[in-house]
Amino acid sequence: MSTPTPTPTSIATPMLVARLNHWASKLGWLLLLVAALVVADVLSLHLHGGSYQFAMGDGVDRLLVHHFHSVEQDSQGKAYRWSLDHSTIAVRGSALVPLAALTLNLGGMPEHVPVPHPVQARLDGNDWLTFSVGSKPRAYALLLPPPTLRDGSLDLEWFTGATHVPPDPRKLGIRLDRVSLRWLDGSLAFPTWTVLAMQGLVIATAMAMAWYLALPRWSIMVIAASLVVALGWLVGSNILIAGSWLARILVTNLALLGLLWSVAPCLRRVVLPAAGAAPQPELRWLWLVTVLAIALRMVVMLYPPFEPHDWYIHRKRIVDFLNGAFVLYDKPAEFSTRLTVVPPAPYLFFAPFTLLTSNPVVAMQGVYAFLDGVTALLVGVMTRFFGGSLRAAGVAALVFALFPLNFTALWWGFGPQVIGQCLTVLFVLFVLFLAQTPLLTRWAWGLAGLVFTLLLLSHVGAGILGGFLLAGYLALIWGFRRNEEPRWKGWGLTMVTSGAAVTLLLYSTVIAMQLDGLSSNQRLAWDAGDIFRVQWTLASLNVSFAPVGVILPILSIAFLVISTRPAHRWLLAGWLASAGLFFAVDLATGLQVRYAYFLVPLFAVGLGMVLDGYLTRHRVGWVVAGCLIGIVGVVGLHLWGAGIFGGIKPSLRGLTH
């Protein structure tokens, strides 16, 4: 009996069914994610009480009020803004609410202005109402028409007819103290589709990163569920700025995903013993630390109400740079507020990203926060080059990622110095790579020269420290390893060409200025006050390396010097000599170049190798290492969170004394 011949239709049907089942499964997971996000958002909005307010001067007002004067304070310390003749309160991406009320806390009219003063209000471009404002502070509760927040947005314009009140040269309208938005009882709020879409994309990109790192399926599901809860809380607690914050988080995730896909294959070849080997658990751990370090910096740093302390300085510089000024001048604290040149390389990094937003400050702080997180990855790779295991590399990256001094630099807006530190570690990696590579390729030397040039152009202090690092290393290998002629000649040529280029381009006009400043520096003449300054500087080293103090960094770096290969000790000697030289200069003259910050990557590498050895040899090693890293992490995260969300300034003593 013959077997029937399969027809194309009978073959294609099972394949089609399998594909349909596959896509149906994907669609089912997508619908489940959307449903989970809606439930999380609605619950969060309900639990937060449906009442949101912002006061002038708390950071949120910068995003929501437009055409107002700058923040001022009255005699009682209360912050407020004066409106212009035409001002706007604009809310974007809020919740979908059928019925809501808006409350305006107004401080009255300027003195000598006749009251009551009429104010004409427009809502979403349509004439709405007219109300009168008196001379005394008062809260005005306005019931919004039902269709107002059905799309999640609100535009309230008012026309006041601003008045000139001598001796103030400005035209003043109404004093605004606070704005409140609340849903009325019984109103159920839902997130907008824009917010839901951004939440879904944030979770999708996070799951893509977890999948790329080959994490177990259960951990990917835990990550997705945790993000649903976290993003729901974000929307419920920050609904007025949720859209802006989610957009920045999404850009962060896309940048992280791009970093993983572009750098991970190369990193496997550099870090793992065998080229092309599958990712080992320790390498996956290093990548997880990197992702968490960048996310921790970016998500918190890009909190919309926050702006770093020195934002106004960098805003002026980036505007000048974009207008064609290559040579920038300022009076930084590192040079005792004497006039000096400001290197332009950081603003060259910032410039392309200013096209992504109308606020260049957001672009700048995002770039250097991202690079600070990348430095954690570079510290881990550097640990591997110095002879540490993959576990030591992960521990070193984690110590660097959580170290409080790094968060202090980020909070104060020391972006150029953060970039300088990243370039310093990257340049050291080139030195280590070329020290153990038998084939000295021209492209490697060219890239090393480019990185060194950018380092010299990144930050005055970082450039000086990096330059002396290379000079010390070059002198040592020329004196003690003269048989390695290609290397010391290559580094000599790199230092001469890069140094000459940056001197001609930038520093030639300021060298004489610095020499004149040093000759007239009163700190060169010692007096009784200098004794206290030296004592303060020595004590500040403990603050720089808080919470572990200065003894542990010294021991960790000493262990690194002893444990690494003899050929690498010359590089470490140059690094330490550069920091030691400027420590002596600081003691003698007060010329502070932030050498402690320069040593943080070296300390992280040394501590990573110390803890790795302790984990291997002692049963309680995990407890000791966990407690030590936990202390560093708790202090660092508390400083970071209190600085961003609580407005508490971190102490500058560890950086500038």
Image (cartoon, helix red, strand yellow):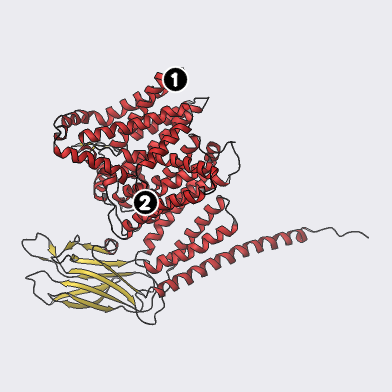
Give the residue at the far bottom of this rendering: 186
Q: Position of residue 311 (x, y in %)?
A: 27, 50
Q: Residues within 10 Å of mark 2 (few under 14, many from 20)?
A: few
Please state, as top left, top right, bottom left or bottom right, where the C terminus lies in the image: top left
Comparing 204 with 638, the one in front is 638
Badge 2 marks a residue whose secondary structure is helix
Q: Is residue 390 left or right of residue 590?
A: right
Q: In this rendering, does residue 330 appear at all?
A: no
Write down the residue under mark 1.
481
Kind of residue sitting beneath label 2: Leu
Kind of residue sitting beneath label 1: Arg
Q: Is residue 490 left or right of residue 115?
A: right
- Comes first in the chain, label 2 or label 1: 2
Where residue 412 is drawn, which disc sits there?
none
Image quadrant assignment for residue 304: bottom left
Q: Nearer the viewer, mark 2 or mark 1?
A: 1
At x 49%, y 51%, the residue is 623
Q: Is residue 590 above or below residue 119?
A: above
Q: Give me the C-alpha separation between circle 2 and circle 1.
A: 49 Å
Q: Is residue 647 above or below residue 137?
A: above
Comparing 164 with 39, the one in front is 39
Please state, as top left, top right, bottom left or bottom right, where the N terminus lies in the image: bottom right
Q: Position of residue 399 (x, y in %)?
A: 43, 46
Give the residue at the far right of this rendering: 1
Q: Position of residue 51 (x, y in %)?
A: 33, 74
Q: Position of residue 451 (x, y in %)?
A: 39, 33
At x 33%, y 52%, the residue is 362
Write down the residue under mark 2.
356
Q: Residues within 10 Å of mark 1 (few under 14, many from 20)?
A: some
Q: Tally the marks.
A: 2
